[in-house]
Image (cartoon, rainbow, N blue to C red):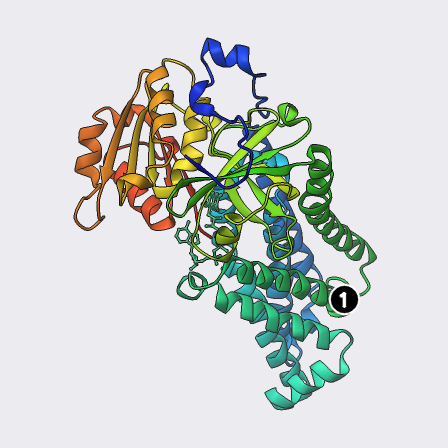
Amino acid sequence: MQTMSTTSVRFDPSASPAGTKRAKRSRPETRHPAPPRRWVLRVAVVVAAAGLVLTLVSGIGVETGGEWSAPGGPAIFVGSLTGLVGMYLALLMVLLVSRIPAVERVLGQDGLVRWHKWLSPWPLSLIGLHAVFIVIGYAEAAKSGLWSQLGTLVSSYPDMLAATVGLALMAFAGIVSIRAIRSRLRRETWWVIHLYLYLALALSFAHVLALGPSFVGHPLTQVLWSLAWLATAGSVIGFRIVLPIVRSLRYGLTVREVRVEAPGVVSVICAGRGVERMAISGGQFFEWRFLARDLWWQAHPYSVSALPRPPYLRMTVKTVGDHSAAVARLRPGTRVMVEGPYGAFTRDASQRRRTVLVAGGIGLTALRALLEDLPPGSQPVVVVRVNKPEEFVFRSEVTELVRHRKGTVHEVVGDRHKVRLDAKVLATMVPDIRQRDVFICGPIGFVEGVVAMAHRLGVHRSAIHYEEFGF
Ligand SMILES: Cc1cc2nc3c(=O)[nH]c(=O)nc-3n(C[C@H](O)[C@H](O)[C@H](O)COP(=O)(O)OP(=O)(O)OC[C@H]3O[C@@H](n4cnc5c(N)ncnc54)[C@H](O)[C@@H]3O)c2cc1C
């Protein structure tokens, strides 16, 4: 193993797999986070649905017969209601990405992203419809043309200019979210576009209170709506900014060593204070921010590739773009900030007694740590799909961990067009797959393919768990 720093730290997970007597003697047990409380999610869904009903009631309840029958009345009503509901759903989307810990623990990264993606077309299209119907309604009421009414609204109504800029930013983010466009973007470009969305919502806030029929002359609704906005902004600031800073200061992590694991793949071993108190499960990840000259402003998600070995913590990165390439050049002593640990891709998600872990390429990192977290004798089956033999990073660690758990490892090596991992191959390797939890990790296309295979082989959807290394 090649080392890029001058001194090599003693981080050797293969020598002491967790769950063995030797591991217990050689290091403190890793602290696990509290198990996910699924009722929290049910309560959150009920509260969100109640909020939606209240929003609808406040939008419909203020409409009078006279307003409805006035010129432009129906269009203004539809415009106001779509705007109100669209804004409410936009707040929910922001709450989802604020990663409220109790909700994140249940849904994990993939669950949050799935809900976020499912929800995202609604606020954007409802707010777009709101703009169209309001212009039509006001034009009918004023008996003017659509373009001249649009000009009047933007130039002479309070806070409308800011709201229009907000709408343009939302539309831009919506277009960029189309998968074909998004997949060509760098992660940090995508992140900056998401910051525009926060700005868009902030810009729209004032016009809602100043002009919305549900708010003008309704102080209680104004107060409730303002509280909802404050709570949402507070969640983002508290959970995404303040908490990570406090935790990072507490751990005081610094890079100790950058270790080459395979061509284009390095492990970064960090050391810090109180790492033994870090509650983390195998399969989880952090958003890592390295305080080096070109990297301090961006945080990227990388899974831990082993359970912590206090004072050490290890992550492993494959070079795919500029951040992952810069990670390989990190110098020992670089300070590190972490946000997390995040993710529900852990043993707590298990529904069955036995598991099969399917890794595509660098997806091995998360599965390697998850494997370490499985109890001795759990007989896991590990399937590793790589293009070249040297891409199977941690082969010896995985083999050793599997041996201690009385499981088996299968390697599928070669060009994916020539050497296929399909449902038939998977069923041959894991004949009892229907009685197992299936954990899948790797690039998006790989994960989607294996999830489909697991469905085809009759694995119940509650027993299929995955983490996609993409965005
Ligand atoms: C929950 C989670 C955990 C992750 N854990 C790990 C980990 O342990 N180790 C690791 O190496 N990576 C991991 N990733 C992926 C990692 O975050 C990205 O590879 C990294 O952020 C890319 O940043 P970049 O600036 O280097 O590349 P960018 O410039 O952002 O992207 C360059 C190009 O590569 C594409 N791309 C991005 N990620 C991948 C990928 N994984 N495979 C193929 N193409 C990709 C992008 O779409 C883009 O076209 C994880 C991702 C998630 C969501």
Q: Residue at x 25, y 30 (%)?
A: 410
Residue under label 1, please give it. Answer: 206
Q: Is residue 89 in sight in this rendering?
A: yes
Q: Which percent across, then down, holds residue 448?
A: 33, 46
Q: Which percent across, then down, holds residue 218?
A: 80, 60
Mark 1, Cα crowd under 10 Å, few <14 / some 14-19 / many 20+, is some
Please determine whether, in this image, residue 412 is positioned above or below residue 174. above
Label 1 amino acid?
Ala
Image quadrant holding the N terminus, namely: top left
Please determine whether, in this image, residue 204 is positioned above or below residue 239. below
**Front-most of residues 396 and 350:** 396
In the picture, residue 369 is in which quadrant? top left
In the picture, residue 30 is in which quadrant? top right
Q: Which percent across, then down, holds residue 252?
A: 70, 36
Q: Residue at x 60, y 62 (%)?
A: 192
Q: Residue at x 40, y 48 (%)?
A: 264
**Which secondary structure, mark 1?**
helix
Q: Classify residue 72 as left or right of residue 350.
A: right
Q: Which percent across, then down, holds residue 442?
A: 38, 43
